[in-house]
Image (cartoon, rainbow, N blue to C red):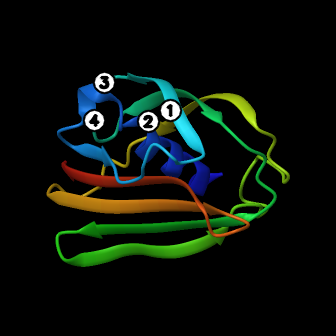
């Protein structure tokens, strides 16, 4: 569930109003296209909850795959992990049918997160190693 939250959080922030901080490193050929994202509050605040409402369209059924997540604080790697997209940590069970998806999640932003520059990358691939989505993150907290 936490991995899905991290992925949705990163995906949520690629909307046009956040393009100066977040960017889509994928292509128009990616299998998941984001259609709408709303953050409340619009900017994460340490120690406060944030609600992310995101929706998009998956254009073909996914029967397996991988989520690669890398997060750095400055030059220090905080997260460098690969997780099976169909793992028990994910509330979506495989196969994941093509179609519209909408998800709302509320989580607490850690109050002890150090201030500074964070960078990240999330690449989601399917059972054929084809890209579903790719997101780059560059933010100061």
**Disc 1 secondary structure class:** strand
Q: Are marks 2 and 4 in contact (CB under 8 Å)?
A: no
Sequence-wise, which precedes: disc 2 or disc 4?
2
Query: What residue sits 76% from the left and 47% below the top?
Result: 91
Mark on residue 42?
3
Sequence-wise, which precedes: disc 3 or disc 2?
2
The location of residue 54, given as percent across then percent down, is 53, 28
Mark on residue 81?
none
Residue indicated by mark 2? 12
The location of residue 36, given as percent across then percent down, is 48, 22
Mark on residue 34?
1
- Distance from disc 3 to disc 4, alpha carbons, whole Å, reads 9 Å
Q: Is residue 69 left or right of residue 129?
A: left
Query: What residue sits 32% from the left and 55% below the top?
Result: 136
Q: Are marks 1 and 2 in contact (CB under 8 Å)?
A: yes
Q: Are marks 3 and 2 in contact (CB under 8 Å)?
A: no
Residue indicated by mark 4? 45
Mark 1, Cα crowd under 10 Å, few <14 / some 14-19 / many 20+, is some
């Amino acid at each position: 569930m936490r991995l899905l939250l991290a992925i949705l959080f990163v995906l949520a922030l690629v909307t046009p109003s956040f393009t100066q901080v977040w960017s889509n490193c994928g292509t128009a050929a990616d299998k998941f296209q984001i259609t709408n994202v709303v953050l409340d509050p619009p900017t994460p605040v340490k120690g406060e909850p944030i609600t992310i409402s995101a929706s998009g369209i998956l254009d073909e059924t996914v029967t397996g795959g991988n989520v690669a997540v890398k997060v750095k604080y400055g030059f220090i790697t905080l997260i460098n992990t690969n997780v099976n997209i169909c793992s028990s940590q994910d509330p979506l069970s495989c196969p994941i049918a093509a179609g519209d998806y909408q998800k709302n999640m509320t989580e607490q932003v850690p109050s002890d997160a150090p201030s500074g520059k964070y960078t990240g990358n999330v690449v989601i691939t399917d059972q054929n190693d084809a890209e579903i989505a790719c997101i780059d993150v560059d933010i100061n907290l």
